[in-house]
Amino acid sequence: MAENVHILEAVCEIAKEEGCEYTFSLPGGGQMVLDAQSKISGIPTVMFRHEQSLGFALDAWGRLSRRPGFAICGPGTGLTNLTTGLVQAYAAGVPGVAVVGESGTEDDDLYGGQGCARSENQYRGITKWARRVPNPNTLLFQVKRAFRSAVTPPAGPCVVAYTSTTHAGTRLPREQAYTNFSGPGWKPREWKILADPADIQELVKWLLEAEKPTMIVGHEAHQDDCQDELREFVHLLGIPTNARRVARGMISELDPLNYQKARGKAISQSDRCLVFGIRVGSYLEGFGAPPYYPKNVRYAQVMNAQESVCLALNTDIEIIGHLKMVLKQMIEAAKDMGIKEPPAKWDQWRQFVAETVADGQKKLSARTEGMVGKKPLHPDLVGRYTAEVLAEKYNNDYIAIIDGFTASAYFTNWNVAVNTGTVLDAAETIGIGHGPGMSVAAGLYTKRQKPIIALLGDGAVGAGGMDIDTAVRWNIPAVYIHENNNTLITAFYDYFYANIAAPTGNKLWDSFEVTHDVRYDRVFGEMGCYTEFADSSEQVKPAIERAIAASLKEQKPSFVEIMVDQMVISSLFAGPLTAMMFSAQVPWDKLPERGRQLAARGTPEQMIAAGMLPQDWADGIRAMQKK
């Protein structure tokens, strides 16, 4: 017990014991010794160009592996920059551990020496917890606690910060180093909690009583690694199912029971819905409100943590347990009730769902036919051609990282997920710039053997583009598809603000536009990417084919520069949303003609009747609709 222990070496040994295959790092003054120690301990350490990418890499690794990603960074702006990636991981319910080397207690309440940046203050509320450890005696205890807490439902990132008393890698007697912690031997484990069998029986019976049942599956189901069990249950009962976010593909989107492409119509017709492992009280789920979760539908909720239950839903049954184990219980309960095949009474319902999905796909394809051959290029075609290449050449076995606002609105309609963990998004924080950092972790996790498609907008390139260099240095076969429309939010200014928000008269200064027509393929070609360029529909598909093939063969990233129409606005701004967002700020007579047409399209008469719109907007919309 008197033997001296190098405290930061012991931190790395804990990380190795927890299964960390990589450390994500950006060296800083207080953390350089830990960065070097990670390598000395045999953990490959990926240096990024910006600390936000450490958090994004931690996030992607946690989503894909279901084990904590491991990131380390330094003090001051190092720990504040890390915030962006950590909050995304927290919003996505992803396990991760970040260790921060921040300045010491001698800097407390001072603005010099980075004393105003403190992990406990910075990360409070956006991680599971953050703990500052000024006494090196308890650092190992807190690091081990972080790894165990990160994977305890609901999963999320935890942060441990050590101070200047430990920066140099203090050596301590083992008796002190392992204060509150017995040392090596606490192996990772998963807590597989069963539900009450009576509750399971009630749930299955409740489902069988439905006339038009549906199921919605989410991130907790992915975290609990229950794809096989979910597919067995869904096919045993024949329940139409929609998997969301990172769980997309848990039921293959080529399966006729998957209603991903017809979510609105299916849920609106359903009478009972099983909400399984998805945090409904969130922005991307409409906080459990209509139209995403209609009031006339009765719900059952099955979660792996009580905190995930949505109190806004009209819920008949609530069950908490490890979702893999709960599904096994549900399968056995259904079989015990004599279920051997999907109930015939749902045949017509299943047919309706399958036909609705097929009809939606036909309309989607028809929508793009008139775009072929036209310039400027519509981003909808980029989504279509990318999806065709991935289906035809790679059997839809790829990882998609969506990092662009308008781009994502069209790409999501086209991309197909056939397994869980293949779609990585910006989570509930809905940020930009995560694509490069997540792609590095995805490439490492897949051993560089799978296509990684990172769809980037102009904002993503600006916020995170320099970490494409990290992908180059680490031989990541990611294909960065940049939809270049010269602006952060496509056409937004021209549709809504052009007539009232022009203090300088220079559109490049007043709008959301960036420098026009920059050939970013040339920029990233200099870094070592394989590059392609396209500005017409016939060029897109061959360019993407060549880029994916080159990345996999040469084990390096590709950058595909595609010039797309600057005036194509995201479909999210059509109709009621436009009216709600702008009617209080922009007078109708100051709204550009494009914006008037958009606001009038689909804005419900109920909004006008309920007095939700100013009189000038109500009159203007009615006049437009008469035309």
Image (spheres, helix red, strand yellow):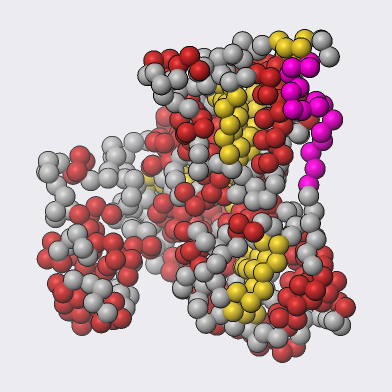
Question: Does the image show residue 400?
Answer: no
Q: In this picture, is 100 found above or below 384?
A: above
Q: Is residue 268 left or right of residue 404?
A: right
The residue lying at 20 percent from left, 79 percent from top is 622
Tally of marks? 0
* Residue nearer the viewer, 109 or 337: 109
Residue 151: x and y in percent read 69, 44
Q: Residue 10, position in %: x, y?
A: 74, 20
What type of secondary structure mainly makes up the magenta span? loop
Front position in the image: 619 or 88: 88
Q: Which region shows up in magenta?
A: 174-190
Residue 486, percent across and down?
32, 44
Q: Nearer the viewer, residue 251 or 155?
A: 155
**Quarter containing the C terminus:** bottom left
Residue 556 sits inside the magenta stretch: no
Q: Percent position (x, y) of residue 436? A: 52, 37
Name the residue: 71% across, 10% down: 171
Write the residue at 55% across / 67% down.
311
Q: Is residue 434 visible?
A: yes
Q: Please tell me in which quadrant of the rendered image residue 272 appears.
A: bottom right
Question: What is the quadrant of the N terminus in the image?
Answer: top right
Which residue is at a point 37% across and 59% down the rendered structure image? 570
Q: Is residue 60 left or right of residue 237?
A: left
